[in-house]
Amino acid sequence: MTKPYTNMAVIGGMFIIGALLVAILFSQLFPNSFFLVLAIDAVGLGIAYYFYILWENEPIRLRCPECEKIISSNTPWMCAECEKPNRNANDYPFVFECQHCGAKPKAYKCHHREKEVDCDEMIFLSEDRDETNYAYRLDSPSEAPEPDEHMEKMKKMEEAKREKYAKRDIALVDADLKRIRMRMKSERQKKKSAKEKLEEGVEADMELEAAEAELKAEYAKKYENDKAMLKRMLAALKANFERQKGEGM
């Protein structure tokens, strides 16, 4: 930034010239006081420089004409020209210029919120009241890009697709469970010995567990080369098993 140094040089030069003129005037009015006045001027110049250093990095405070809230010039901001962030706002505030492209914003969009609504009032920094090249706070919600409608639509379609696959997997497992249990019931209906009839009662109680175990083995063999599909089918099997067990089937 060269502008502050230019201003300091101009003001300092004017101060020195004025101090010399005052010293000459006092030396004419009060003989032998020339060096005393110069010493006083040097002290005054030192005090002025001290306050310049002290206030050099003090941000400029602007008041929004709409919400009347204060905005500090060292607020990190985005340049509308190059669309790059200015995080070093102490050296490159929005009242000066962009660090990246050198563009000078002509307005600043107020970032304050009132009752969950952005103020968005333009605070003009030039007399032409130009709104095209304005600065705005970094990560400002009102400047966030609109969501991609196509991507949102594709995301919803993908979620619906996964849901349909899950329902299909459960239906397939449900059909397999019913098929195996029907086969087991059919085998029990054949003429059996007393021992077999006793075993039949035990098998009836363990029928669902036996069907689940048989299907696990069947799926492990069927999907041995497709681990993802095997995981899905086993999950669907577990869901069906819990449901039918709860129904007391």
Image (cartoon, rainbow, N blue to C red):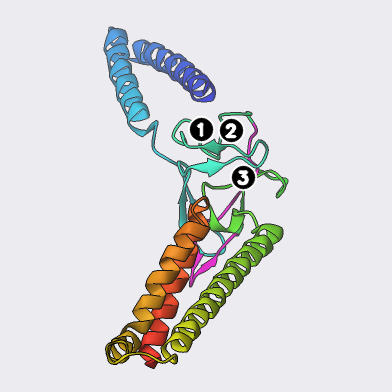
x, y percentage for residue 210?
36, 76
Question: Of discs 3 and 1, which sits in the foreground?
Answer: 1
Callout 1: SS: loop
x, y percentage for residue 60?
46, 42
In the rendered image, which residue does mark 3 sit on? 125
| Left or right position of 46 against 211 | left
Amino acid type of disc 3? Leu
* Distance between the alpha carbons at the discs numbered 2 and 3: 14 Å
* Magenta-span inclusion, residue 199: no
x, y percentage for residue 156?
63, 66
Report the span colored magenta: 103-120
Question: Of discs 2 and 3, which sits in the foreground?
Answer: 2
Residue at (32, 12) in percent of width and height: 38
The first of marks 2 and 3 along the sequence is 2
* Image quarter of residue 44: top left
How many residues crowd around disc 3 within 10 Å: few (fewer than 14), some, or many (20 or more)? some
Amino acid type of disc 1? Tyr
In the rendered image, which residue does mark 1 sit on? 92
In the rendered image, which residue does mark 2 sit on? 98
Residue at (62, 28) in percent of width and height: 102
Can residue 131 be seen in the rendering of this structure? yes
* On screen, residue 81 above or below 42: below
